[in-house]
Amino acid sequence: MKCQALDDANRLESQELFVLERPVMAHKNSKDPCLIYANAAALQLWCRRWEEMVGMPSRLTAPSIERQKRSAALHLAKEKDAIEGYHGIRVDKKGRKFLINNARIWTLWDERGNAFGQAATFGSWSKI
């Protein structure tokens, strides 16, 4: 019964994260990280379905001219485990650019204490 209660709590937390008003995304650590998660707000903002977004290289969320800045922020977040206050330009599926503000990027850890990816969220954005 104890395991069932834990599973129910995890399921509820997962549902709450998916419907959160703030976009939340995550990717695994790799040379060219691919997204492993995007909640409903992120899917809507990037104008993509789950099948299109999850599995795509996360660098494609930003226009090519912004990717170096994005990469530097991810590297800094990896060194410090988390950063706050990041802002940058992103691009949706249709090529429309928008500015994300006050983003938080943090390290994802597995049950053994190994860093396996990064996640990000931000509370505001504006069309450019």
Image: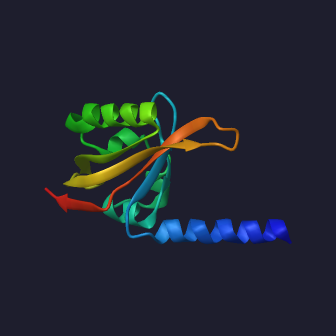
Seen in the image, is 74 located left or right of residue 39? Answer: left
The count of marks equals: 0
Question: Which residue is found at the position 46% from the left and 62% from the top?
Answer: 39
Q: Is residue 18 above or below residue 59?
A: below
Question: Which residue is found at the position 52% from the left and 40% from the top?
Answer: 117
- Colour scheme of the picture: rainbow
In front of the other: 122 or 127: 122
Quadrant of residue 110 within the rendered picture:
top right
Name the residue at the right extreme: 1
Q: Position of residue 56 (x, y in %)?
A: 44, 44
Q: Position of residue 19 (x, y in %)?
A: 47, 71
Seen in the image, is 72 located left or right of residue 34? Answer: left
Quadrant of residue 12 within the rendered picture:
bottom right
Name the residue at the left extreme: 128
In front of the other: 85 or 57: 85
Q: Is residue 40 above or below residue 26?
A: below
Q: Position of residue 78 (x, y in %)?
A: 45, 34
Q: Position of residue 18 (x, y in %)?
A: 50, 66
In front of the other: 57 or 20: 20
Q: Is residue 117 above or below residue 4?
A: above
Name the residue at the top extreme: 31
Question: Which residue is found at the position 40% from the left and 61% from the top?
Answer: 43
Question: Which residue is found at the position 47% from the left and 38% from the top?
Answer: 81
Quadrant position of the N terminus in the picture: bottom right
Quadrant position of the C terminus in the picture: bottom left
